Amino acid sequence: LFSPCFLIPRMAIRADSPAPSDHSDAGDELREGIEQFRRGDYRGALRTLAGLHDRDVATAVEALRWSAQANAKLGAHDTAEAQLQAALRRVHELPAAQRLKAQASIQLRLAACEQRRGNDQEAERLQRAAIASLSPESQDADEGGEFEELDRGAHGRQMTLGSAWNNLGITLMRLGEEKGAREAFEQALTIRRSLGDREGYCLAASNLLALQQGREGTEEAPSQEFIAGMEDHLRTARQMGASAHVLTPLRVNFANCM
């Protein structure tokens, strides 16, 4: 926890890392692999999940995604990317209720792979593709009798959409596209406020502050509009019930930005 009197000279931008879904109907082996991952036993998780990559499509896609996460934790980034690509090749076989969020989550993780290589243009393309995957047009496209399932999965898709907008903002910020970055962070804030996602809301607001701090050296003070907007974000975060753990760094860095 940051002390209220501690001023941070420059904030780090923070990306989201959407986790694969944890289906309640997952098989015992898949559940065991997920639990091993969550305990930090990444090698154990890989051993458990390895035999699931060729099972039914829902199990295979989830196993590949969790395996990719485990390999990334172990620094095996090329293997992780290959597993994400394998999952993406099969994701179209999933029912619509699972496909939309799964495809977007995979695209966001592949975007992170591209950013690790410094390929921000490809990262932007993948992040925009993830946003398109979760658009109303994609959800309405010829899904027959699956609308009830889509409704039940709406919260998870909106959470992923918030992550996609936040991460796109970071990419655009790296590319020097300040206006686009600001608009993307504002989209993430709107979605997270509607979901009551306190931590995600504060994260996106912090990235807006980082965008302002990135202008240091221009001798341009924050505008009154920006200050009023950030005060409103702080007020909203408090009203949402954000804990001191996530509120204090935001509040301190706002003061430091002035």
Image (cartoon, rainbow, N blue to C red):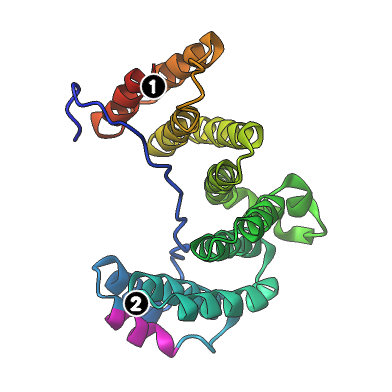
Gap between marks 1 and 2 measured at Cα: 44 Å
Q: In the picture shown, does residue 8 fall above or below 30? A: above
Q: Nearer the viewer, residue 243 or 11?
A: 11
> Circle 1 sits on which residue?
257
Residue 108 located within the stretch drawn in magenta: no
Is 148 left or right of 224, judged from the image as shown?
Answer: right
Q: How many marks?
A: 2
- Report x, y in % for residue 128: 68, 51
Residue wearing tag 2: 33
The quarter of the displayed image where residue 146 is located: bottom right
Query: Residue 40's spot in the image, x, y percent?
Result: 25, 69
Whichever of labels 1 and 2 marks the residue nearer the N terminus, that label is 2
| Residue 83, horizontal then vertical, whole percent | 52, 79
SS type, badge 1: helix
Residue type at tag 1: Cys
For the C terminus, the quadrant is top left
57 left or right, relative to 227: right
Q: Main secondary structure of the magenta part?
A: helix
In the drawing, what numbered circle is on residue 219?
none
Residue 113, x across and y down, in percent: 52, 66
Nearer to me, 206 or 38: 206
- Depth check, front residue: 234 or 56: 234
**Location of the N terminus (image quadrant):** top left
Which residue: 49% across, 16% down? 222
Residue at position x 38%, y 41% from top? 12
Image point 42% across, 37% down: which residue?
203
Other residues around mark 1 within 10 Å, as few (<14) / some (14–19) / many (≥20): many
